[in-house]
Image (cartoon, rainbow, N blue to C red):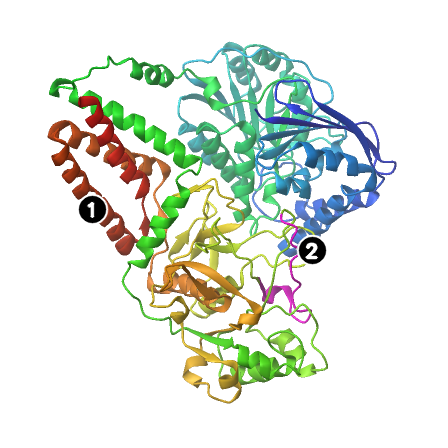
Amino acid sequence: MGKLVVLNLATGSFEAGFPVTLQIGDENARPIVEITGDLPPNPEILIAYYHWQSIYLNLKFPSRPIGIPKQSKQKPSLEDCQQAADKLKVCFNTWLTADSFRPIREKCLEKLLPEDNIRILLQTIDLRLQKLPWHLWDLLERYPNAEIALSAPSYEQVSRQPPQSMVKILAILGNSQGIDIQADSKILEKLPHANTTFLVEPSAKDLTDQIWEQNWQILFFAGHSYTSRSGESGKIHINQTESLTISQLKYALRKAVARGLHLAIFNSCDGLGLAREFADLHIPQIIVMREPVPDRVAQEFLKYFLEAFASGESLYIAVREARERLQGLENQFPCATWLPVIYQNPAVMPLRWQQLHLNNSNLQTSSLPQITPRVDINRRFALSAVMLASMGITVLLMGMRYFGLLQSWELMAFDHLLRLRPQEKPDSRILVINITEEDVQAQSSQGRGSLSDEALAKLLEKLEAHQPQAIGLDIYRDYAVQRNYSLAKRMRKSDRFVAVCQVSNPQTGKPGIKPPPEVSPDALGFSDIVLDTDNVVRRHLLALTPPPSSVCTAPYALNVQLTLRYLYSQGIKLQFTHDGAWQLGKLKFKPLEAHTGGYQRIDAWGHQILLNYRTLSNPEAIAPSVTLTQALAGQLNPHAVKDRIVLIGTTAESFRDYWLTPYASPTGKPQEIAGVFLQAQMVSQLLSAALDGRPLLWTWPIWSEGIWIWGWAIGGGLLAVYLRRLTYVSLAIGIAFCGLYGICLIILILYSCWIPLVPAAIALGGSAVILVIRSS
């Protein structure tokens, strides 16, 4: 059962404050908690919002508004927009931490669990409150399955009509001047179990007739639209010459709602006025864009939303997933994740795709167990028995896998296969300068930390004389340089130098570590590492969005910053594909999701990929290395530095910068690797993939894994049914196990693909055992 949270902001103003009422309860039940609080006066929020909006509206990108003037004479930059957005975000979250609002915040933390599915309804008639980016509330970072929707304070319940054989969608493709809405129609055409009727630039009469004549379940609009200055109404441009407000379609739309219209999607600009006007007709759900929306963003949101919604996600989770996936476009279209918002009728439960159409699969599934059981399975019914047993064990295993019950076994098997891969050569494009315990002791009188100002100054001077491509300092320096002007100037001015910091984590209470004050934000990378439950590093965190309160605001990892500098010298720049994937030259890769291969229900925060360690006798042999003493003594080979990436870090035991890897030490325990060598492994992974064609680790989609597991279950069942004798079955299953093991290893070695070993092995043996027992 999900949770419903209602935040009712009564009549007020930013100059006088807003009284707030909080209700928390289970879905479709009376609230179990109700408390009140206040949001204090804060006119600065409006100033910050209007400042951001004025910049955003004057950005020049193909979008779906008509009638919104571009007033700025000087074109603002994307950086200006991002800075204004960051300022608004900080101001907004500061407002929500006010003492008078604290009881509401604390009650949410008390009654809601991070794993809860949560709908948050913001009830207010104030358009300015509805315009604010409530999804940026830092409290929501604790709740990955929560999404905020807007709602009017007054509403009525509408009856939900029974599902139809196909989902009926009326898609209005309005005035498309300057934009591409054909992409929207192609996305709608691919929807499963859907019957979509397209109206291309219809007249007002044709549109009204279509709404009246059929029982529509979803109304879709793409084209140009805008909200009036009052915010109480909006207009859609249905063709080159006609535009309509919702009130001009009131009678037809009221009839449509009574006949079962569940959802309206306005994939167009500035739609809050449309939603506020449409809400008076008590439609269950509306999806609109808060502000003018770039054409590309509108297309990507629709694709991501419909993929998630039609695959079974709830409307709220589908909107959140689609909205967050827009982050990959924000380098080109800032604040893209701010735009989509749900407008909800509180009297109606959230919609699911499966509730809109009839599906006989449940009836078919429920009939399977009614097959007449027999003690003796003869060959006439052998195939039916094998199919039944294999399907049952596959469903069971996929369910267990989904809830993470097999994850620890799968990770152990994955580690085992990684260790069997052939040895590779070290990466000569990287040089590691490690600071040993002896190096630390030799500097003990020169300052704090593992690397003194004097030693760092001398080291950078020697390195830059040999012209490396990039220098990465994998040592925290959250303090200023002391009386060493040349070092401070070098750190500030060098275009090769990249420093490190640690991002704050509000969920775990880690405050983070500040960057060196001399280093510009563009020359920073974070050091945060993703650990599995057994504290082994198997994932590579490339990028993240730091919390607004973080002392470290670096969006990319240290290893990514160094890699990008090296690749830039090779003519390769980081780009993002239309679906949000990263692209470095010919290399494309998407981030891990919560369910990826053997990983199930993981926290896939940021942008993560699997870490494909370079296979060596020792993971720390990834690249040539010298000690700090050797480097300062002039024992650097110029050819080992020139045009290379130089990583500086400590291997001293006293600083314990060590991490567990999938590889095993001679004692059988997971082998540790110093942090600077782990960074080198990550740099080498990206360089080798982008320049050498060394593949990244990847997994099959879930449907392929399901077919794979089902195939081994069928194989085990067939062996049991047709061999019958226990001795023969045991021998055949043993040979099949060896074949499965070999296939998984070969595919991992040749194609770097991690395919399910443990679930397939269980399916193979489990189905054989079931069929042997049943036939005995």
Q: Which amino acid type is marked by label 1?
A: Cys
Amino acid bearing label 2: Gln
In the image, what residue occupies the spot 64% across and 67% down? Answer: 520
Looking at the rendered image, the disc whose residue lies closer to the viewer, 1 or 2, is 1
Q: Looking at the rendering, in which quadrant would you find the N terminus?
A: top right
Q: Is 328 included in the stretch rendered in magenta?
A: no
In screen coordinates, is 72 left or right of 584? Answer: right
Return the residue nearer the eye: 218 or 378: 378
Quarter holding the C terminus is top left
Q: Which residue is mark 2?
A: 74
Q: Where is residue 261? Give x, y as percent.
A: 55, 16
Up-down: is 482 above or below 337?
below
Q: Residues within 10 Å of mark 2 (few under 14, many from 20)?
A: few
> Measured from the top left, where is residue 132 in percent x and y?
71, 38
> Circle 1 sits on which residue?
738
The tag earlier along the polypeptide, 1 or 2, is 2
Secondary structure of the residue carrying tag 2 is: loop
